[in-house]
Image: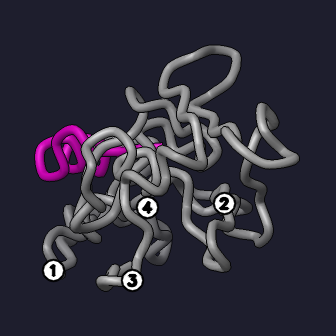
Amino acid sequence: MQHNKTSLTAERARELLRYEPDNPPEIGCFFWRIGPRAGKRSGSVKDRTNYRRIKIDGRRYREQRLAVLMTTGEWPPGNVDHKNRDRGDNRWSNLRPANNNENQWNRGANAGRSLPKGVRKRGNQYGARIGYKGVKYYLSHFLTPESAHAAYAKAAYDLHGEFARAA
């Protein structure tokens, strides 16, 4: 999300909100500072993406982006990744900058799939493949989905580093 000159500033955000970056059990929560909602938790989940958003001055902002703004004083230049993949967990220790590829690498397996992440059935064997910087790599064919997934998991950690998510 690009921000222009009329976008929310860190000063305005801090005037309106209090961010509690690592206060369990409140997981990176925001609270209103002023108005009739002062002291109440701000933000809500309004769509199926499960990102928490806060409406300020008529515009909705994702909480993880507001956390960066309020902590660093600047909008994040790219994506903000949730290390544990919980989009509602906006603790500062759970957030990190990420480009589009890194953000995708941290995704889990598709729900409802019978095969592990990175594994496809190919005839009576199982193929392992992984994407990296726009290129798909076919790792090999295996007799079991478990051995194909093991190859995928190793490649994921080798290629994706801290953003690797094998499951």
Measure the alpha-carbon separation of dots 2 and 1: 37 Å
| Earlier sequence position, callout 1 versus callout 3 | 3
10 sits to left or right of 137: right
Considering every residue shown, the one lying at the far right of the view is: 36
Place of residue 100 in the rendered image (x, y in percent of width and height, measured from the top left): 28, 71
Residue matched to label 2 = 54
Q: Nearer the viewer, mark 2 or mark 1?
A: 2
In the rendering, which numbered label is found on residue 135? 1
Place of residue 34 in the rendered image (x, y in percent of width and height, measured from the top left): 71, 44
Q: Which amino acid, mark 1?
A: Val
Q: Nearer the viewer, mark 2 or mark 4?
A: 2
Label 1: which secondary element: strand
Foreground of the two, 130 or 1: 1
Place of residue 72 in the rendered image (x, y in percent of width and height, measured from the top left): 25, 43
In the rendering, which numbered label is found on residue 6? 3
Residue matched to label 4 = 119
Measure the alpha-carbon separation of dots 1 and 3: 38 Å
The answer to whether residue 162 is magenta is: yes
Q: Is residue 18 above or below residue 126?
A: above
Give neighbour class at mark 1: few <14, some 14-19, many 20+ (Cα, 10 Å).
few
The quarter of the picture where the N terminus appears is bottom left
Label 4: which secondary element: strand
Q: Is residue 75 above or below residue 137?
A: above
Foreground of the two, 65 or 98: 65
Q: Which amino acid, mark 4?
A: Val
Q: Nearer the viewer, mark 1 or mark 3?
A: 3
Considering every residue shown, the one lying at the far front of the view is: 35
Measure the alpha-carbon separation of dots 2 and 3: 17 Å
Q: Which amino acid, mark 2?
A: Ile
